Amino acid sequence: MSLLVQKYGGSSVANIDRIRNVARRVKKFKDAGHDLIVVLSAMSGTTDTLINLARSLSKTPLEREFDALVATGEQVSISLLSIALHEMGIKAKSYNGNQAKILTDHVHTKARIINIDPSTIQQDLDDGYVVVVAGFQGVTDDGAVTTLGRGGSDTTAVALAATFGAEECQIYTDVDGVYTTDPRIEPKAKRLTKLSFEEMLELASLGSKVLQIRSVELAAKYNVPIRVLSSLQEEGEGTLITTEEEIGMESAIISGIAINKNEAQITVLGVPDRPGIAFDLLGEISSANIEVDMIVQNISQDETTDFTFTVGAVDYDKAMTITEATAKRIGARKVLGNEEIVKISLVGLGMRSHAGVASKMFRALADEKINIHMISTSEIKISVVIDTKYTELATRTLHDVFGLDQLEH
Ligand code: ASP
Ligand code: MG
């Protein structure tokens, strides 16, 4: 029978009843003849609690110890699930990152997996065990515990699925799939049945929070189909994330609308228009390790130009300070900041072959008198920056105009 990797997130193992629920589900698959590797997150809230404990002692906790601490959450849930499985008569064994031989680099708090040595786990699978692995953690070549970044259990699951050639990597969470947009903003949002890796990457990086981005990158690289499912529903096919070829010709023009409220906009007015200006303004920002997302430079008038870019909201204050200093140095007139912005993006493979998506989007927004501050496009995505207060209106309007509540996805 085939091998499945199943990952259960924090809300799926939030308490003893939920852990029993997971055990019951795992038993069902095991009884049906599947081999199973189960990857768990920490019980919900645990990782945050552990992080706060470390921060209450130090603003900059030693990274080695920080990782050793926050990795303990997953070790609790894997042991509990293994105990629950035993109670149901299923052989199960828990593995922390070190025991599972998940070798990572030395970059604490956001380590990358280098290699997984399959020997021990394979032996246990062959002996009929359900293998229960702690997500989010690995080990360095010199034995230090590392963690893979928030939400990293998804990446653990995909890496294991790739290593063991699993038929599918099932990600169980508290929603039953990936939606056309955030259902809290547009109640008519629909679950997508299929989505390409590329679309999911755009949706994930644009603010949809279902999967850690790195897990999708890894899945695309190793061709691991991911299925997002609810651990609280008995039935349901969830959303399958797979290759473009799998999805075939019937891909929708637009698959989803991503909403990102975590950016802020900085505009520099009256910038002397000469070579090197973009580098002057953005070089300092990137030296401070601040990521810039959208960039717009206007056509110059009277030898000066305006320059606008967006940064993550968390970096806004720092970016403003830097930009004000640079503006002064290069003789720009003024710096304006705006934190009340949202980036709304349409994503869809079909955009490649259909003209007119952008104009349809702009017209819909214009009809609602929504002013667009910035626009950026890529092959399968169009993003606009607008005022935060229009988030709901813009999302619902676009959802409607592009028929996302009607399409058979
Ligand atoms: N427990 C970790 C977190 O909260 C990893 C995960 O849940 O995937 O980020
Ligand atoms: Mg998660």
Image (cartoon, helix red, strand yellow):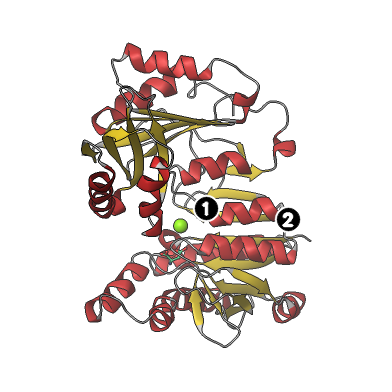
| 1 vs 2, front mark | 1
In the image: residue 243, left or right of residue 215: right
**Image position of 91 (left or right of 228):** right
The answer to whether any part of residue 25 appears in the image is: no
Ligand 2 is within 8 Å of the C-beta of the residue at disc 2:
no
In percent of the image, x 36 and y 39: which residue is there?
A: 309
Q: Give the number of the disc on residue 213.
A: 1
CB-based contact (under 8 Å), mark 1 and mark 2: no
Residue pictured at 47% horizontal, 52% vertical = 232
**Residue closer to the observer: 216 or 363:** 363
Query: Looking at the picture, how far across and down is residue 211, in whole percent?
Result: 50, 52
Disc 1 from disc 2: Cα separation: 21 Å
Q: Secondary structure at mark 2?
A: loop
Q: Quadrant of the C terminus?
A: top right
**Residue 35 left/right relative to 141:** right
Label 1: element kind: helix
What amino acid type should be assigned to the residue bearing mark 2?
A: Glu
Residue 41 drawn at (x, y percent): 47, 66
Quarter of the image that includes the N terminus:
bottom right
Residue 82 is marked as none
Q: In the rendered image of this protein, does residue 253 appear above or below residue 259?
A: above
Q: Nearer the viewer, residue 66 or 386?
A: 386
Residue 7 to residue 296: above or below? below
- Tell me the amino acid under the disc marked 1: Ile
What residue did someone put label 2 on? 167
**Residue 273: horizontal and vertical position, in percent?**
36, 32
Q: Is residue 219 above or below residue 145?
A: above
Viewer-closest of 80 and 160: 160
Mark nearer the N terminus (1 vs 2): 2
Residue placed furthest toward the bottom: 142
